[in-house]
Amino acid sequence: MDPGKGAILLDVRLPRVLLAGLVGGTLAMVGVTLQALLRNPLADPFVIGISSGTALGVVCFLLSGLSVTFWGTTASPLFGFTGGLLTLFFLYRLSRVHGRIFVQTLLLGGVIINAMLSAVIMFITYMVDADKVMGIVYWLMGNLGSLDFKALAVVALYALAGMVVLFKSARGLNLLALGDETAVTLGLDAERTKRVAFFASALLTGAVVSVSGLISFVGIMIPHVLRMVIGPDHRLLLPASVLGGGIFLMAADTIARSLISPTEIPVGVITALCGGPFFLFLLWRGRSRYWSA
Amino acid sequence: MIQEGGHDPEMSSMYTLKGVGFRYETEWVLKDVDLTIERGEIVGLIGPNGSGKTTLLKILGRHQRPAEGEVRLGSDDLSTVPPRALARRVSTVPQDHSIAFSYTVLEIVLMGRYPYLKGWAFESAEDHRIARSAMERMGVDSFAHRLFTDLSGGEKQRVIIARALAQRAEVLLLDEPATFLDLHHQAGIYGLLRELNRDDGITVVVVSHDLTMAAQLCRRLLLLNKGRIIRLGTPSDVLTERVIEEVYRCGTLVDAHPTTGRPRVTVIPDWKEA
């Protein structure tokens, strides 16, 4: 093989493929978790505003022109995580009455906060200089390029920490599907489990959104597809979603890169256009058999 | 008696409540409750709507923490028992059976083994054996792999009780387990509770609106009204026409049940036949 091609393969293609796997797997796992926590099929990091909060954090970082570093690499995930966590914390306080979380309030509040934060991001991108705007818009549309191994390793570290926490909560998530009261009856510290899982979800979302931008549909589609195939046990569902989401986004990114090569399509466009119809087909075929509230 | 967690096996009472009160905001829904429940007892909590009987059951299961007073489970302060340890000693059959995902019957019953497992663990062969025997006991083993959401009300109720049995707890708390069930399933549930109490020595506390059925099933009845204990004693002590009239504000006829000899309560309609 000619050495130039080898370098491209190793330094450009490989990190990108690994990142696609990491981002896809993480988004799908967060989707599984949020759907269980909120007992609602529509929940995913985008719908309840964690992604927008993360995005706003990252946009602020990009605009500040700060060259803050964290563990020798960009602090962008840290800003994103902070934005996502602040959003989640606000939602949590909003929907908390007498120490209990009211899920419907959290979900509705999330939808509204999502709209508000998106408006703020739009306003910012409208106001800033033209030379900065392209970078932000390109990032917001969702892309997986331009990342070296070092940055990948940092993101992987954040993501891995979140994954370990969620895997350990798997049986707790199973119980939460029966409702808080029943979960407590069976020996689960429900409020603690929810706090930990929400926190891990914000961490994971912050880590991946800060490097990949807003890639929709993975977090809502993959969990549903897998639940139809392997059932609702989170001990299997969580690892399966990491695999399934990862493979799905790797495939989508390959299509995004090669469909009208050499021009790249934003991968978020591919995920929505491939995922949407497939998901609708599954819904039509399965007809609400597997989800009941 | 199954004793996990190695707490004192001395013959202390199962529950000891002293001066227990509970309030929402400023309104007291339970006040000055003193109560002792012995091991192996079967107690019925009765009273009109809003009398505090469900709140009392929730305090026993620690779904609500009392605003004042003390609750002891055996020799332990109930508020300090860790969640998993509590689930190994006290099981609850709640009223609400809604679930968010389509779990199978077997998966639901296996969740009763949660307090015995740690972290990202799968149930052992022993857990499966215990779940299976609980399902056989409740007559639901034939549909182990059906979806819980596809079951009828009576079947769901029996699955939930099977899950409680899989916890292998010494106490079983039930909130109106026979509501919405037809006569056959009502009789079935009450028969099972009696069997579990008599054959397995499980302490049963059951909230019920059905005074007659509660009288046949329970050794003692606790009658609550407006958050306070009105009467506590054997069914024939508690269920008199005068007391029921006072608390429920409706006329009843109390006579002896033809087969058990225990009180039977019949409501007297407050209109006259033409």
Image (cartoon, coloured by chain):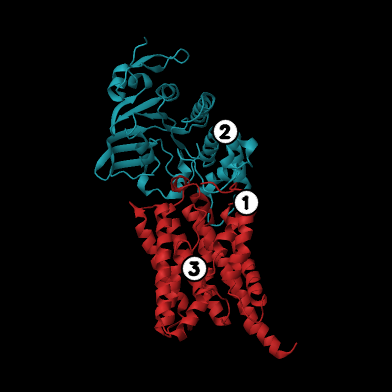
- The tag on residue A142 is none
Considering every residue shown, the one lying at the far right of the view is A1
**Residue on which disc 1 sits:** A284
Q: Nearer the viewer, mark 1 or mark 2?
A: 1
Name the one closer to the observer, B155 or A228.
Answer: A228
Q: Which colour is chain A painted?
A: red
The x and y percentages for residue A79 are 43, 75
The x and y percentages for residue A6 are 70, 86
Q: Pointers 1 and 2 in contact (CB under 8 A)?
A: no
Q: Bin the neighbour count of mark 2 within 10 Å (Cα to Cα): few under 14, some 14-19, many 20 and up.
A: many
B127 displayed left or right of A169: right
Q: Nearer the viewer, mark 3 or mark 1?
A: 1
Q: Which chain is cyan in the picture? A: B
**Residue on which disc 3 sits:** A205
**Residue on which disc 2 sits:** B138
Please name the amino acid that badge 3 sits on.
Answer: Thr
Say which chain tag 2 marks: B
The x and y percentages for residue A116 are 39, 66
A173 displayed left or right of A94: right
Whether marks 1 and 2 lie on the same chain: no
Say which chain tag 1 marks: A
Badge 3 element: helix
